[in-house]
Image (spheres, rainbow, N blue to C red):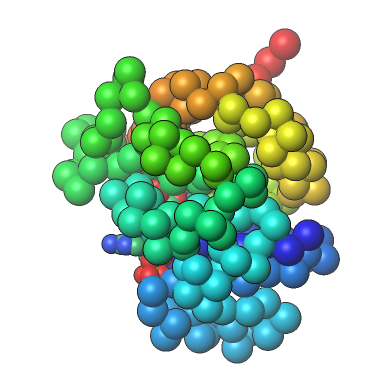
Amino acid sequence: MKIGILGSGVVATSLARGFLAHGHQLTLGTRDRSKLEGWHAENPEGAIGTFADAARFGELLVLAVKGTAATDALRAAGIANLAGKPVIDATNPIADAPPVNGVLRFFTNLDESLMERLQREFPDARLVKAFNSVGNASMVAPTFRGGKPTMFICGNDESAKKTVTGILDQFGWETADMGAVEAARAIEPLCMLWCIPGFLRQDWVHAFKLLG
Ligand SMILES: NC(=O)c1ccc[n+]([C@@H]2O[C@H](COP(=O)([O-])OP(=O)(O)OC[C@H]3O[C@@H](n4cnc5c(N)ncnc54)[C@H](OP(=O)(O)O)[C@@H]3O)[C@@H](O)[C@H]2O)c1
């Protein structure tokens, strides 16, 4: 597939590695090309450009920017370039405030997630929450003693979730579909839980698994 990734950080480049390893074509988007020039030198098969370039290129998009900038990044990508496309939303609504005893602070609340805000503002984008509840080092080909981990996803569009489930299969995850966009109220805070052992004990190597 043609993949457009909005972002230049560790999530964008970790997922890019996975997409390239599985033979997808991709463009990474940023406001500042210099941030991606080192990555591009090591990965010449991938392209770099603006947020709009990445969004225009992709049949499947990935939103991998700071949560506070998610709306601005999608606006910069261009509404027409988002229309009808599945968009993996890996963002978390982390506030610009320090954690409390290892617990991150969010700028959303339990009755309204970031993905709901984004879906409302960009109704023609087919948003799917995924990859937000694990560290970037484990996003592709995760290996854990406890077996294949679970990625919780949600979104309003069944076919977009099917596309994203296909990518999660390739990347080595089992997928648990938690339903429509409102489920992001529960999935986004998994990031808080995932980070606590890291902040408290420097333990950043784990993932969630749903047991039947
Ligand atoms: N780090 C992890 O392991 C991890 C794991 C799961 C989920 N997440 C979530 O994934 C997202 C990306 O995380 P990250 O650690 O890779 O990077 P990050 O530092 O949270 O975000 C970097 C990206 O945000 C963009 N950005 C920042 N301010 C902006 C603004 N005012 N307008 C437009 N874009 C702006 C930057 O754009 P430029 O390229 O233009 O500078 C850059 O691409 C976050 O929402 C994070 O919570 C992170």
Residue 168 placement (x, y as % from top left): 72, 42
Residue 9 placement (x, y as % from top left): 45, 65
Q: Farthest residue in the top direction?
A: 212
Q: Residue at x 68, y 46 (%)?
A: 142
Report if residue 183 is visible in the image. yes
Please count the marks in the image.
0
Q: Nearer the viewer, residue 142 or 152?
A: 152
Residue 117 placement (x, y as % from top left): 37, 35
Q: Residue at x 30, y 42 (%)?
A: 94
In which quadrant will I find the C terminus?
top right
Query: Is residue 37 shown above or below 89?
Result: below
Q: Quadrant of residue 143?
A: top right
Report if residue 137 is visible in the image. no
Q: Nearer the viewer, residue 93 or 31?
A: 31
Q: Residue at x 67, y 24 (%)?
A: 176
Q: Residue at x 42, y 85 (%)?
A: 34
Query: Is residue 47 shown above or below 62?
Result: below
Horizontal side of 55 relative to 121 (left or right) equals: right
In which quadrant will I find the N terminus?
bottom right
Q: Farthest residue in the front direction?
A: 80
Query: Is residue 122 shown above or below 38?
Result: above
In which quadrant of this rendering is ligand 1 seen? bottom left
Residue 119 placement (x, y as % from top left): 46, 36
Q: Quadrant of residue 43?
A: bottom right
Q: Quadrant of residue 47?
A: bottom right
